[in-house]
């Protein structure tokens, strides 16, 4: 494992570098035959895939500055449009449009089918377990799907929570999860996030909240215009260094 000093130097170079990176639009099918669209950002051939899932009513555009940075670190990134998406950063969710075109009835929870399909796609491409990274409600879906899916190596959850009301209790459903988890929160919802994981073995979880600012919910916390983004990035990179 690289020393902490090497990680710090890599982080400084990473922050100072540009983030332009080529991307490729790819498509694959869910089990209910919805066409799922995603942007692929190439890292290293031998590196695992990080599957990036956006917040509710958002799109893969949520990761247009995040994914290139992760790719620069060598990770292969797949920013996935979910059927419960809409648009962000002038990028619309093509999966949402496909769902409407096929006139498929869906709710927010049914986006878990898109996550399942993305896991299959990422695993086939890399032939190794993938890393899930979710934003708010998709962070929760990632925990629910990742718990028992052997093709998932670890889970990065930005602002997970009880987003599905009476449908299910996330706190109860994730009991027994035994994979590395990065659980990020704001200062305001730290206790809420820790309560969500109160029935999970704490040795599996790396908690993070910013110290200098309140922070932001979801993966938007990593956007460079967010005051605490550097804090979030540093903690995330320390976690990812153990997932290679």
Image (cartoon, grey):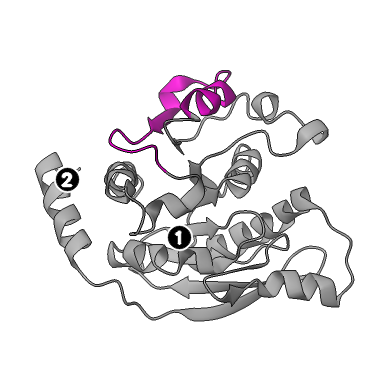
Residue at 69% over, 39% down: 163
- Position of residue 135 in the picture relative to residue 21 (left or right): right
Residue at 81% over, 53% down: 107
Residue at 67% over, 75% down: 94
Identify residue for label 2: 2
Q: Is residue 10 visible?
A: yes
Range shown magenta: 190-215
In reply to whether residue 208 is colored magenta, the answer given is: yes
Which image quarter holds the N terminus? top left
- Mark nearer the N terminus (2 vs 1): 2
- Position of residue 131 in the picture relative to residue 83 (left or right): left
Q: Secondary structure at mark 1?
A: strand
Residue at 17% over, 64% down: 16
- Position of residue 178 in the picture relative to residue 16 (left or right): right
Badge 1: how crowded within 10 Å, few (<14), some, or many (20+)? many
Q: Is residue 152 above or below residue 80?
A: above
* Residue 155 position in % (x across, y down): 49, 43
Foreground of the two, 50 or 104: 104
> Which image quadrant for residue 214?
top left
Instruction: Say which mark, if any, is on residue 49.
Output: 1
In reply to whether residue 163 is colored magenta, the answer given is: no
Q: Secondary structure at mark 2?
A: loop
Badge 2: how crowded within 10 Å, few (<14), some, or many (20+)? few
Q: Is residue 238 above or below residue 54?
A: above
Q: CA distance from mark 2 to mark 1?
A: 20 Å
* Residue 58 position in % (x across, y down): 61, 62
> Which image quadrant for residue 10?
bottom left
Q: Is residue 92 above or below residue 160?
A: below
- Position of residue 159 in the picture relative to residue 118 (left or right): left
């Amino acid at each position: 494992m690289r020393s902490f000093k090497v990680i710090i130097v890599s982080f400084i170079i990473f922050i100072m570098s540009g983030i332009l990176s080529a991307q490729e639009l790819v498509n694959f099918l869910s089990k209910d035959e919805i066409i799922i669209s995603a942007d692929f950002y190439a890292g290293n051939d031998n590196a695992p895939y990080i599957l990036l899932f956006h917040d509710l009513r958002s799109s893969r555009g949520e990761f247009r500055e995040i994914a290139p940075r992760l790719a620069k670190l060598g990770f292969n990134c797949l920013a996935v449009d979910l059927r419960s998406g809409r648009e962000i950063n002038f990028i619309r969710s093509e999966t949402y449009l496909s769902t409407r075109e096929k006139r498929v009835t869906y709710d927010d929870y049914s986006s878990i089918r898109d996550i399942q399909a993305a896991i299959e796609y990422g695993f086939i491409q890399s032939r190794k377990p993938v890393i899930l990274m979710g934003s708010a409600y998709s962070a929760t879906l990632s925990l629910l799907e990742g718990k028992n899916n052997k093709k998932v190596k670890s889970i990065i959850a930005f602002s997970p929570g009880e987003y599905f009301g009476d449908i299910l209790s996330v706190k109860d459903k994730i009991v027994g999860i035994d994979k590395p988890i990065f659980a990020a929160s704001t200062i305001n919802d730290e206790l809420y996030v820790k309560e969500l994981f109160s029935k999970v073995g704490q040795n599996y979880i790396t908690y993070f909240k910013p110290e200098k600012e309140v922070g932001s919910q979801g993966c938007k916390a990593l956007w460079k215009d967010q005051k605490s983004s550097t804090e979030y990035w540093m903690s995330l990179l320390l976690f990812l260094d153990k997932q290679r």
